[in-house]
Image (cartoon, rainbow, N blue to C red):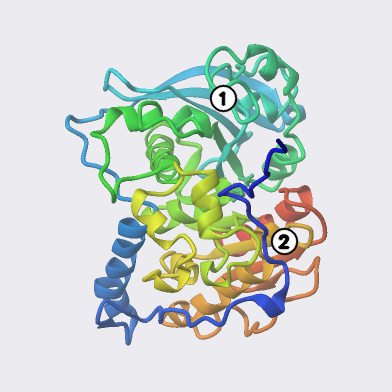
Amino acid sequence: MMAMVLPSATAFTPNYDESKVPDYTLPDSLVVAGKEATDSAAWEKEVRPATLALFQRDMFGRVPVPTQPLNPSVSLESEVADACGGKAVRREYLLRFSHRNSPSIRLLVYLPKGQDKVPAFMGLNFRGNQIVEDDPRIALETGFVLGGKKTGDNTAFAEKNRGTGKERWPVDTIVGRGYALVTACCGNIDPDYDDGFENGVHAMFPKPKAEGWGTISAWAWGLSQMLTAVGEEIAEIDAARVAVIGHSRLGKTALWAGATDPRFAIAISNNSGCGGAALSRRAFGETVARINNSFPHWFNANFKNYNGNEAALPVDQHQLVALIAPRPVYVASATGDQWADPRGEFLSLLNAVPVYQLYDDQPFGGVTTMPAPGKSVGHRMGYHLREGKHNITPEDWAHYLDFADRWLKK
Ligand code: GTR
């Protein structure tokens, strides 16, 4: 008998045809849960908290209350004075909590030499700190990394990856422009797979309910802890001038970190796509159902109610951008990254303008249409579309550094 091949339940064909984007109406970012923001005070007092609560309830989740104090502690593990051809001091720190299930978060820090209280970029990496530079003195990430073994020792994989992220982390340029860089492997905070909240920082908290946090929320929480650690331990960095940055799933994380922690001075989302800067209602490229099926652990259980049902979402991603107001925000797309819906990413920024306008007449510099590739536009809200693939490149960084110069240099 011939076997019948049935289409798998998860078969998914992304829409890349602009004419097939469903008609949609975006929720009004200024009127949420019956509250209206007519000025910045009303936004801050009522509409912003109501918006944040909806994102927590239906998407990223709420961080559970720990059952005991977590008492973070930071130890300096290494320091070299010859990084970036002698332009930088490089340190490694270990951030831990007093809970018996605490993971160790290993921070890699570059500080421009001889400068005090510098602004900084902070972002997570996928494959361990050793990717940033091919220097055997940087500790290998032997635990969970993207592309390595899910459990067990990843030493061999980490060895192979030394220095492979140097395009993504152009430390020489960053330091040369007067910024510090702080990074850590996202897997230190929460390994990127569905494990029922058993590992990573999740293991220090009670098990979440339907509203509970997923991995993106855990990563964002980790970034906040890293910011606290920087403020307390690294006098060379001005913790009030830290830009949180991330690529792809870590770009979604950077936006959520910027939304939940107002201490981040700027949030930068690089090719963050669905669940990040891209409008969910456009269902262009990756969709809510697809992301929840492929990565059930990224968002909370309630977010699954919107699979194939984007119109019912009480918020859309322009409101995630708006939660960062009035702090500067930057979104970037790539022409070859249709999966992340460049137009949807741009439209989120554009539709967050009314909230930013409560603070600034022309937050987006009067921009109303998507710019040509290669050009950075905007003012307090920045955007560019890079020619090329899903990636973060020195060209992206050049725009981020210019943007940071505008807002973080004294
Ligand atoms: C993809 C996922 C995207 C994006 C990307 C990444 O597989 O569909 O949402 O997050 O991974 O993080 O590299």
Q: Residue at x 51, y 30 (%)?
A: 187
Q: Does the rendering let one see residue 120?
A: no
Q: Which residue is mark 1?
A: 91
Q: Residue at x 25, y 29 (%)?
A: 70
Of circles 2 and 1, the one toward us is: 2
Between 219 and 76, the residue placed more toward the observer is 219
What x and y, as percent, mark residue 372? 80, 74
Quarter occupied by the N terminus: top right
Q: Residue furthest front?
A: 1
The residue carrying pointer 1 sits among few (fewer than 14), some (14 to 19) or many (20 or more) residues within 10 Å by Cα, namely some
Q: Amino acid at mark 1?
A: Arg
Label 2, secondary structure: give it.
helix
For label 2, being within 8 Å of ligand 1 is answered no
Left or right: residue 233 versus residue 150 is left
Q: Residue at x 38, y 59 (%)?
A: 305
**Mark number for residue 338?**
2
Quarter occupied by the C terminus: bottom right
Measured in 3D between alpha carbons, the distance from the residue under mark 2 to the one under mark 1, in whole angstroms, is: 38 Å
Label 1, secondary structure: give it.
strand
The residue carrying pointer 2 sits among few (fewer than 14), some (14 to 19) or many (20 or more) residues within 10 Å by Cα, namely many
Between 204 and 394, the residue placed more toward the observer is 204
Q: Does the rendering let one see residue 301?
A: yes
Left or right: residue 227 versus residue 119 is left
Number of numbered labels in the structure image? 2
Sequence-wise first label, 2 or 1: 1
What x and y, as percent, mark residue 111? 60, 35
Q: Amino acid at mark 2?
A: Gln
**Mark number for residue 148?**
none
